Amino acid sequence: MWTAISSRRHTPEQVFVFSGDMDNAEVMLHGTVAYTFRTGGKGQMPWSGRAKLVRVSGGTVRMEFYQVYLDTAAQKPSS
């Protein structure tokens, strides 16, 4: 799916937290992904994702699981 893409940038616009446990939180994210095609065109489309965040030693928060949802039919280059 990403073979034609040279770069992409995900911008979260909304974050929904599904757990009060900050050591083991589950969140849903919604936003926009902007990308550049290897041929030079650019595009963007809505994007959403589900993530599980865990606190590791030293208090650092890491992403343990991440799943992206997007409509690949919307992936069209613009001039």
Image: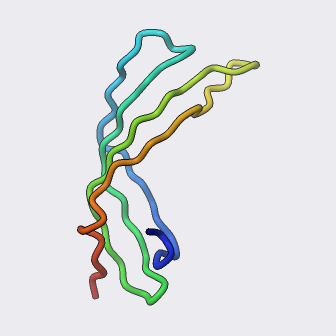
Q: From the top left corner, tell me how far across and down residue 47 is, in percent.
A: 32, 52
Position of 26 with respect to 46 (left or right) is right
Q: From the top left corner, tell me how far across and down residue 58 is, in percent.
A: 75, 19
Position of 79 with respect to 40 (left or right) is left
In the rendered image of this protein, does residue 74 appear above or below residue 57?
A: below
On-image quarter of the N terminus:
bottom left
Residue at image point 31% right, 48% down: 31
**Quadrant of residue 61 within the rendered picture:** top right
Q: From the top left corner, tell me how far across and down residue 32 is, in percent.
A: 31, 55
Q: From the top left corner, tell me how far across and down residue 43 is, in percent.
A: 32, 73
The residue at the far top in this view is 21
Position of 2 with respect to 70 (left or right) is right
In the image, 69 versus 14, the foreground residue is 69
Residue at image point 27% right, 59% down: 71
On-image quarter of the C terminus:
bottom left
Residue at image point 46% right, 65% down: 8
